[in-house]
Image (spheres, grey):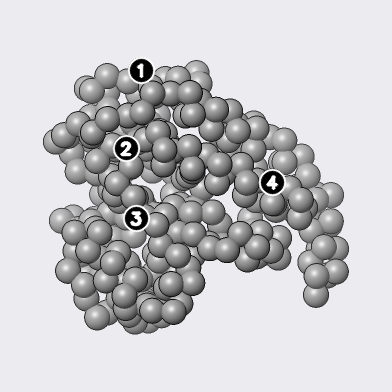
């Protein structure tokens, strides 16, 4: 089976290999630079109050359990989970037209941040009118590489970070047939997959040290071992009352595209 996965990835590499070096915030070199930027930056203090509510963010390296956690949370009546969307970039584009993203975001005024937050609310509500009055959970595994941006725009956001044994994650990424982009093109070679995991997790460690994150780490193996305990923990962290329906996440999953 491993030989077949390797052959398949070689065929994909012939077609999509150029994506491995495409310019994008998720490129490994950019992730390394961002880690250095965060490591040099002074520690960020407590969050400033904002008039617009913040979503919760569900992040983790691909194949680490983000989708499982999303389905559990989606089964709560008070939650609307967004798929892997570009809402954050769409909101940022309201005030950021060009230039280096991180440098521009670092210099945003409070008024500009409020503008971005309001724009985010508008684009979400336009696509998800059913979300009115509910907690928005924005799930995107590689939003890890945008954590410094998220922390600047939504310093009051709650963040759930899923973690799984690195060996499982790297092997699963290598075996999975993803849609191709800069990040997933790294998974076509096993050593690149491991190196990319390392780069992203180094960034995550730097962010946890330097940014004031309201963060809950959820272990994939713990969800598998005791679903109810972990579902209750996630609900409590998000300020929600546990609902038994969260344990029937498979029913939710079958009802979604």
Residue 107 got which mark? 1
Q: CA distance from mark 3 to mark 2?
A: 13 Å
Q: Judge left or right: residue 197 versus residue 124.
A: right
Q: Residue at x 43, y 23 (%)?
A: 41
Q: CA distance from mark 1 to mark 2?
A: 18 Å
Secondary element at image label 1 = loop
Q: Nearer the viewer, residue 220 or 30?
A: 220
Q: Judge left or right: residue 121 versus residue 85.
A: left
Q: CA distance from mark 1 to mark 3?
A: 28 Å
Residue 216 got which mark? 3
- Dot 4 or dot 2: first in sequence order is 4
Q: CA distance from mark 4 to mark 1?
A: 31 Å
| Residue 3 lies in quadrant | bottom right
- Dot 4 or dot 3: first in sequence order is 4
Identify the residue position indicated by label 2 in the image: 212
Mark in front: 1 vs 2: 2
Q: Judge left or right: residue 204 versus residue 80.
A: right
Q: Residue at x 84, y 57 (%)?
A: 11
């Amino acid at each position: 089976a491993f030989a077949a996965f390797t052959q398949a990835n070689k065929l994909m590499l012939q077609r999509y290999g150029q994506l491995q070096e495409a310019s994008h915030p998720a490129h490994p070199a950019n992730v390394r630079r961002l880690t250095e930027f965060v490591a040099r930056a002074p520690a960020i203090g407590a969050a400033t109050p904002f008039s617009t509510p913040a979503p919760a963010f569900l992040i983790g390296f691909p194949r680490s359990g983000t989708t499982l956690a999303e389905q559990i949370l989606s089964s709560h009546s008070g939650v609307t989970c967004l798929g892997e969307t570009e809402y954050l970039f769409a909101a940022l584009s309201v005030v950021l037209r060009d230039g280096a993203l991180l440098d521009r975001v670092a210099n945003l005024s409070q008024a500009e941040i409020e503008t971005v937050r309001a724009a985010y609310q508008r684009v979400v509500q336009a696509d998800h009118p059913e979300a009115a009055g509910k907690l928005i959970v924005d799930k995107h595994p590689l939003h890890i590489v945008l954590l410094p941006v998220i922390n600047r725009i939504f310093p009051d956001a709650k963040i759930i970070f899923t973690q799984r044994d690195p060996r499982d994650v790297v092997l699963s990424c290598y075996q999975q047939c993803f849609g191709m982009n800069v990040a997933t093109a790294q998974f076509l070679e096993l050593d690149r997959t491991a190196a990319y995991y390392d780069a992203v997790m180094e960034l995550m460690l730097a962010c946890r040290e330097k940014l004031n994150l309201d963060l809950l780490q959820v272990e994939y193996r713990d969800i598998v071992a005791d679903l109810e305990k972990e579902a209750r923990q996630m609900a409590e962290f998000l300020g929600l009352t546990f609902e038994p329906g969260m344990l029937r996440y498979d029913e939710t999953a079958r009802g979604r595209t």
